[in-house]
Image (cartoon, rainbow, N blue to C red):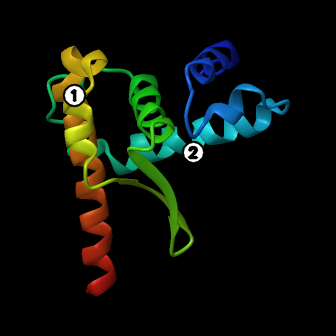
Amino acid sequence: MPAPSVRNLARQWTGRLAHYRRHRNDEHLDALVEEVARYAGLHLENDLWASEYWSKAPLARRVAVLLYLVDRGVVAREVRQGRVVYVPTEEAEGWAASQPSLASYLPPTLELIGALRSDLARRARRMTS
């Protein structure tokens, strides 16, 4: 994402990521966005390719929505076995459904949350096999 787009994205954060708005080092913000882009592009691709919405949406939109969910505390950024993963809370779908501002974007948001859950389930299966 171009630097102005990343800064504009950060201006919308009012929750857990709000400190990035005041961050003096753009490198930290850029690193976060790059990390999320890799995750959303590589790890979620197989789960979202069949989606009518996500198969056509640019990667930057996936990044923006995932970071929005992290900012609101609906998805947690965790490190598991040395790798960053994004973990939806148990009530993530219910939270999304209760947000009037997400009403027109609810199906794609739920698909993204489902893709996160699917990725975590795959990781868990790999660890037990």
Residue under numbered circle 1: 108
What distance separates the C-alpha of mark 2 from that of mark 1? 21 Å
Q: Position of residue 98 (x, y in %)?
A: 22, 29
Label of residue 35 in the image: 2
Indicate the position of residue 116 as horizontal and vertical percent values: 30, 50
Give the position of the N terminus as an image quadrant: top right
Q: Nearer the viewer, residue 108 or 39?
A: 108
Given residues 16 and 34, the one toward you in this image is: 16
Q: Nearer the viewer, mark 2 or mark 1?
A: 1
**x%, y% of residue 108?**
21, 28
The amino acid on which the numbered mark 1 sits, given as a three-letter code, is Pro
Q: Secondary structure at mark 2?
A: helix
Residue ID at (20%, 36%): 110
Q: Amino acid at mark 2?
A: Glu
Q: Kindly tell me whether residue 48 is visible in this rendering.
A: no
Instruction: Kindly identify the residue that appears in the image at 46 percent across and 52 percent down.
Output: 76
> Is there a contact, CB below 8 Å, between mark 2 and mark 1?
no
Crowd class of label 1 (few under 14; some 14 to 19; many from 20; radius 10 Å): some
The residue furthest bottom is: 129
**Secondary structure of the residue carrying numbered label 1:** helix
Quarter of the rendering containing residue 20: top right
Q: Position of residue 39 (x, y in %)?
A: 45, 47
